Amino acid sequence: MPKPIIRADQIKVGDYFEDCNYHPCVCTEVNVVNKKKITCDDDISGISLINGNRTSCSLTHCGPRQLTFEEAMIWKKSGPTDVEDKNINRWWDREKIKYVIVETTNSFSEEFPNEKILDLPLLNLEQASNIINVINANFAGKEENFPRFWKYEEFGYKPKSGV
């Protein structure tokens, strides 16, 4: 069972922990502000075993939990075994989520005019990601006066209309 980490001396670099997003992580840094007392600034940093992102958790505010290697591998494959709250971002249920491919402008602004959903079957995340990678590598921005880009969104996404 994972153990709450409440003091910085309970974890060291190379240990495994669960971050605020329930990702299993490997600890890369333990930051202790004051060795004589616990402060709200004490935190741990690590790398997520789910997506490779760097993460940092306050020992006071986030409630990270220490994991054994075996628990970290179970979390990586299936998610935490003891989380029942359905209102959180349950990344481990992502396999059940279906995605659509959306054609949009090749723009990083907040407005994406004239989006449309491609007429394809519903896809899992891996399929959707693979498809947009191929389409974008071959077609994104190839037409000078009409640059387009393809992305994936969860099923139920409402395309944005033209400006």
Image (cartoon, rainbow, N blue to C red):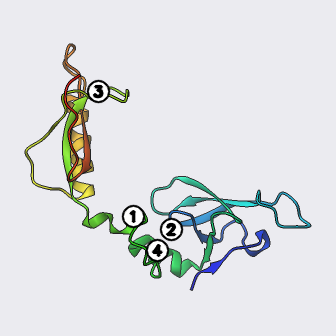
Q: Is residue 65 above or below residue 28?
A: below
CA neighbours of label 3 inside 10 A, class few (<14), some (14 to 19), many (20+) = some
- Residue at horizontal 59%, vertical 55%? 55
**Circle nearer the N terminus (4, 3):** 4
CA neighbours of label 4 inside 10 A, class few (<14), some (14 to 19), many (20+) = many
- Judged from the image, the secondary structure of the residue bearing numbered disc 3 is loop
Q: Quadrant of the N terminus?
A: bottom right
Q: Is residue 142 above or below residue 151?
A: above
Visible in this render: residue 29? no
Q: Which residue is mark 4?
A: 75
**Circle nearer the N terminus (3, 1):** 1
Q: Which residue is mark 1?
A: 91
Of tags 4 and 2, the one toward the viewer is 2
Q: Which residue is mark 3?
A: 106
Q: Tell me whether the residue at label 1 lies in contact with that at label 2, contact meaning CB atoms closer than 8 angstroms.
A: yes
Q: Residue type at mark 3?
A: Asn
Q: Which residue is mark 2?
A: 22
Task: Tell whether 138 sits left or right of 49.
Answer: left
Residue 29, x across and y down, in percent? 71, 59
Quadrant of res 159: top left
